[in-house]
Amino acid sequence: MISQLPALQIVIPLLAAVLCAVLPRGNWAWAVALGASWAMPVVAGLMLQEVLANGPISYAMGGWEPPWGIEYRVDAASGFLLMLISIVGAVVMPYAQASVAAEIEEHNVPWFYTMYLLCLAGLLGIAITGDAFNAFVFLEVSSLSTYAMIAMGKDRRALVAAYQYLIMGTIGATFYVAGVGLLYSITGSLNFVDVAARLAEMETSRATLAAIAFITVGMSLKLALFPLHVWLPNAYAYAPSAATAFLAATATKVAVYLMLRFLFSVFGIGTTFDALPISEIFITLSLAAMFGASIVAIFQQNVKRMLAYSSVAQIGYITLGIGLANKMGMTGGIVHLFNHALMKAALFLVLGGVVYRIGTVKLPDLAGLGRRMPVTMGAFVIAGLSIIGTPGTAGFISKWYLAVGAFEKGWWWLVFLLVTSSLLSVVYIGRVVEIAYFREPSKEVASATETPLSMLVPTLVLVAATVYFGIDTTLTAGIASQAADVLLAGYR
Amino acid sequence: MFDAGLFNYWFVVALMMTGLYVVMSRKNLVKKVIGLNLFQVSVIMFYVSMGKIEGGTAPIVVEGAAEDVVYSNPVPHVLMLTAIVVGVATTALALALVVRINEAYGTIEEDELFADGEDDQ
């Protein structure tokens, strides 16, 4: 049983998704999805424990030995990501029942859970696989189910958002396949470890550089690196609340992981960062995201859309860590990947609760909400403080590591820009807090009550986690620095 | 530069850029999907031509065959079977979305979809 864990991580949600599709009632499908998604952290936790104790796990799918067969490979970096996706997937599930029932038509509810589980399986698959083409298949499994989930949003704009995401996402994935094709034509292999070993023996050719370019651009589209982020704000704003919380926390993070895998493990830092100005490109675009997207966020009227722009800015911090490409910077980027997932999921869950009670997330409609829904809005304030990076919250830890990474390079100006960009998030989070706490309740808000318990508890769990990981960092920063070591060392 | 043996790459690049240009320049949602298909097909052609070896035959071991027989590489071809399936699924989903958009908005022209400035609210 234990030796089959890597397969179970994918097979359980995949089979449960099929089961959900044939169930006639929404609540039955929800129960199946709940069981499957709660099994995921257990599986991921057992594997992560094994990896931290005894080193990477290699699993030959179907008994075909790598490099010919598809290898599932769990090391510190992928184990950490599997854990993150599993936890978010499991926390959002109990929340989904009430939220989905309110936002999606009854006959579509089982389909929503089918898509949710398929997306979960796809994202976990990208993290676990050691095969470049298999990663593409999982990427498309997760993407196609994501498009369908977004299109289930109530607003008709959800359809256009899903369509735009489909176009951009498919271009990104096709770029990725083109890059993998070039790699295959150079090395004759698709297995990450094998490709890395074969590339190491060769001169860096122009084809290798083209492969790096294709894969980097393709993944940058998927992870919404500024200025390739245009699909993200509408997709997150109009998707059903539970889907937004899940996707904001996981989808872009998985794309970051896959790009890290290629840049560091497969091509090796010597090829990517020395032969191409990748560091400069990432740092410039990250700064543009941190400032540009934050400024746009300040002027949004729809709070969900505001947080979506904030996501683009926060992804900037993650890619900044990649651009720094030293141990502290990478640790900061990977910790932020985890911390941002927790706090952004918490914020979107709060908004789901607000939609459930008052049916809108327009900024003026939220006036006085802090008095009617004190616990829910309290959760928003704490998670918001974490976005800003206040000491004592998880957001501070990641920015701290990034700042140390910048200092190590002697780039004090970058530290200054990090702090300045955080001030912009004070403005957009502050706007919501000001309106929710210091204005007279609007008529929508007047009769609002606290969010139901099944939705409140998952939100509070994530908020508690952002505070906990802001104080005790042994778990997050510890594993992240191991993951950074794994990535910086490459497979050699 | 213009090596005749590399013409397949020129074909792929031309097809790829045509597809990408159609996706970006057309305002009609169905035409965009067609462009996307062209774009995907270019990558499929790239893989397929990559696996073909001059004088190569089907990679089936036959008893009594000549010693110096050359086989084509079947792996890229098999990979593309998967990619074609993915492409069909993507196209189906995209067209389904276009149908729903047409029902909700009464148009599939991009500029008309955004004409009412709904997004700014």
Image: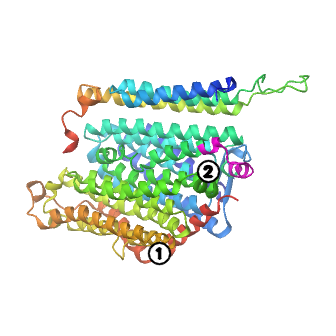
**Which residue lies at the image location 37% right of the left edge and 55% below the top edge?**
A288
C-alpha span from label 1 to label 2: 30 Å
- The one nearer the camera, A437 or A185, is A185
Q: Read off the magenta span.
A: A194-209
Query: Magenta stretch containing residue A475, yes or no?
Result: no
What chain does badge 2 belong to? Answer: A
Query: Which mark lies nearer to you, 1 or 2?
Result: 1
Along the horizontal axis of the image, is A286 left or right of A326?
A: left
- Numbered circle sitting on residue A7: 2
> Considering only vertical position in the picture, is B114 above or below A1?
above
**Which residue lies at the image location 64% right of the left edge and 42% below the top edge?**
A206
Q: Look at the image and tell me whether residue A131 can be seen.
A: yes
Q: Secondary structure at mark 2?
A: helix
Instruction: Determine contact: label 1, label 2, CB under 8 Å.
Output: no
- The one nearer the camera, A273 or A43, is A273
Q: Earlier in the sequence, mark 1 or mark 2?
A: 2
Helix, strand or loop for the magenta stretch, by majority: helix
The picture quadrant where one finds residue B13 is top right
Q: Disc 1 marks which residue?
A: A473
Q: Position of residue B18 (x, y in %)?
A: 47, 26
The picture quadrant where one finds residue A115 is top left
Q: Secondary structure at mark 1?
A: loop
Q: Amino acid at mark 1?
A: Thr
**Which residue lies at the image location 48% right of the left edge and 67% below the top edge?**
A332
Please state, as top left, top right, bottom left or bottom right, where the C terminus of chain A lies in the image. bottom right
Query: Magenta stretch containing residue A197, yes or no?
Result: yes
